[in-house]
Amino acid sequence: MSVLVYIQNFGSKLKKQNFEVASYGSKLAESMQCPAIAVVMGTMEDSELEKLGNYGISKTLKVTDEGFNTLINKLFTQVVQQVVVQEKVTTVIFPDNNEGKAIAPRLSVKLNAGFVSGVVSMPVTLEPFIISKRVFSGKALAQVQINSPLKIISLAINSFGLHEAKTVNQIVSFEPKVSVDDQSTKIVDRKIHSEGISLLDADRVVSGGRGMKGPENWKPLEELAKVIGAATACSRPVSDAGWRSHEEHVGQTGKIIAPNLYIAVGISGATQHVAGISRSKCIVAINNDPDAPIFEVADYGVIGDAAQILPKLTEAVKAFKGE
């Protein structure tokens, strides 16, 4: 019996969310009195994978074929399925991001396993297995019971934190009985956006909405983000209009984030957007409309023109830092 943690490969590197999922998996395994193991696809140095041992992972199975460097849903699902069977896994944990959302439901169907997405805490009880997740755009918690022998869950990013539990992590090569060449999906080109700070790992985020009035007005927002060491983001209307990349879209239909600080500039605060940022520890809203819904969820609000406020805020931060 074991708990399996799915480790996403970020260009042969591990990120904070990997360690958070590992922390959760090892804590759950401890309560179930079994080992926590991990699986990772694609090329990654053993020295990098050994870091998972700092968070309680005692064994990592790695699939080193370069064909696994790019996500192919069907292929990855087959590999995880084989690991589940070989290692007698009782619970599988995915990150609740695009990759987890692509694989976990498929695995659930293939193995007839109960699946709960976006969990935010450890199980309420193990027998029966009851776990909590956010519902109604993050405004409420639901407790869901999984009755199947195999359980699959995805952990909401930045909901559990990092918890060290140092152990020796054994790195083992795993050779799945699948072939990259046999898959119907072929990756012909990849473009990786690697500039700036990753939204999912950022402690601070500065985000813009339609109130920025156009892509040519983004420089003051970017300067503020640079000064405070923040990632940049945007609302859906902004990405749909092509002002910013869809990689920066946060909200119910975009990325769900939970930074320590979220600064919303010119964002009205539609329900779909708030659903993606509701777990932020501190929300600061800048908007010239005093009746904007964003002020209802903001911890601090500034009413005024962003074009005037952003440069002054940036200068104030620089002065505070002595720059």
Image: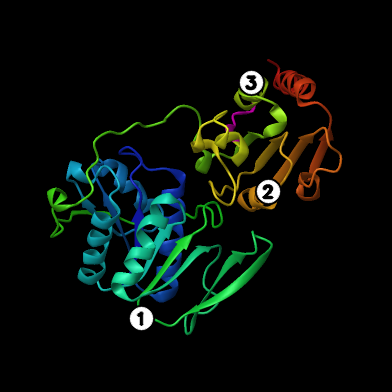
Mark 3 lies on residue? 223
The three-letter amino acid code for the residue at tag 3 is Glu
Compared to 312, does 303 lie above or below? below
Residue 83 on image: x %, y % = 23, 64
Compared to 233, does 92 lie above or below? below
94 inside magenta stretch: no
Which residues are the magenta region?
228-233
Q: Quadrant of residue 238?
A: top right
CA–CA distance in space, label 1 to label 2: 36 Å
Q: Residues within 10 Å of mark 2 (few under 14, many from 20)?
A: few
- Residue at image point 70% right, 22% down: 321
Mark 1 lies on residue? 149
What's the mark number on residue 7?
none
The three-letter amino acid code for the residue at tag 1 is Pro
Between 286 and 124, the one lying in front of the other is 286
Mark 2 lies on residue? 281
CA–CA distance in space, label 1 to label 3: 52 Å
